[in-house]
Image: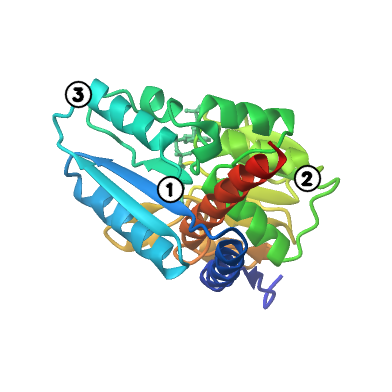
Amino acid sequence: MAGVSAEIIDGKAIAAKVREQVARDVAAFTERTGRTPGLATILVGEDPASAIYVANKRKSAGEVGIASFHHELPADASGEQVEALIEQLNEDDAVSGILCQLPVPDHLDGVHLTGLIDARKDVDGLTPLSAGYLALGREGLRPCTPAGVMVLLAEAGVSLSGAHAVVIGRSNLFGKPMAQLLLAANATVTIAHSRTKDLAAVARTADVLVAAVGRDRMVKGDWIKPGAAVVDVGINRSEDGLHGDVDFAEAVAVAGAITPVPGGVGPMTIAMLLRNTLTAAELVSREEATA
Ligand code: NAP
């Protein structure tokens, strides 16, 4: 319909709101317990993009009153060295959350290494135990990006109970936990992937469409049910700039609400990492109080 335009879900503003709330909650936690939540970051090797991501996470932690402990290991660090560091951080009471920046150099097994992080300190929410807690609906730390999407949908007033949510992408990092979170919120969930037949037709049945594929503007306007909420997780860099997995120009005329790229899902990831670090500190403090 000409002239109709979706609500743009402003991830930057919502992430700023989450960070402000985390800062207030950190201050209250510190006042109550006398402790400062701490985030330990591990960077193995010299990948420049990873170094920037970690630096941003540490800076953001400092801004909300979370202490940060940074550990850098050389690109040729052995698996045993990284394991020893993770074990040391698991034991360290000043460390509430541990983040091992991925990817690690090729000779190391990132899945194995992150799996060694104590689930109570797993602020990325990616260990097998955290994934299990999510699948079982038990308390635990949730992966940051899908948790951020849930906040965006809530802030945009998108009703999930009974809605049909289609998640395109089934990665362990995003698609699977996203589907679990939507299911826990009582959506009827379909997970689509590269083998899905007639993806456009499946997408068109979605009241809530989440695209996490990594293919530039793959989701076209005619894949979208009029009025649907569309969440674009993709980050694709091309000669003409940064684009999501959704063709925004087409989708904005059909959807009811949509996240832009950049400025949609992206800013939520660090905000949720900060929230998770505080949650981790609170869980330990609660355990101690009841011990
Ligand atoms: P991934 O591990 O590469 O997974 C991509 C998924 O897309 C797979 O499940 C794959 O299916 C599916 N897929 C690939 N081609 C497809 C096609 N033609 N039709 C339907 N499905 C297709 O990627 P990821 O880690 O989940 O990330 C996805 C995107 O989100 C990337 O652009 C990434 O940069 C972005 N991302 C952004 C953030 C953020 O903070 N904003 C965080 C995480 C990820 P198969 O399983 O069948 O191969």
Image vertical order of residue 31 relative to residue 104, above or below: below
| Residue 123 rendering spot, x and y as whole percentages | 50, 44
The reply to whether dot 2 and dot 1 touch (C-beta < 8 Å) is no
Which residue is at the far right?
162
Horizontal placement of 25 versus 261: left or right? right
Residue situated in front as seen by the camera: 277 or 92: 92
Residue that numbered label 3 is attached to: 78
The residue type indicated by label 2 comes to: Ala
Q: Please, what secondary structure does the residue beneath circle 3 have?
A: loop
The residues bearing labels 2 and 1 have C-alpha atoms spaced at a distance of 34 Å
Residue that numbered label 1 is attached to: 94
Q: Which residue is located at x 46 percent, y 66 percent?
A: 65
Q: Earlier in the sequence, mark 2 or mark 3?
A: 3
The yes-or-no answer for disc 2 within 8 Å of ligand 1 is no
The yes-or-no answer for disc 3 within 8 Å of ligand 1 is no
| Residue 88 rendering spot, x and y as whole percentages | 35, 33
Q: Earlier in the sequence, mark 2 or mark 1?
A: 1
Which of labels 2 and 3 is toward the front? Answer: 3
| Residue 201 rendering spot, x and y as whole percentages | 68, 40
The residue type indicated by label 3 comes to: Ser
| Residue 105 rendering spot, x and y as whole percentages | 22, 31
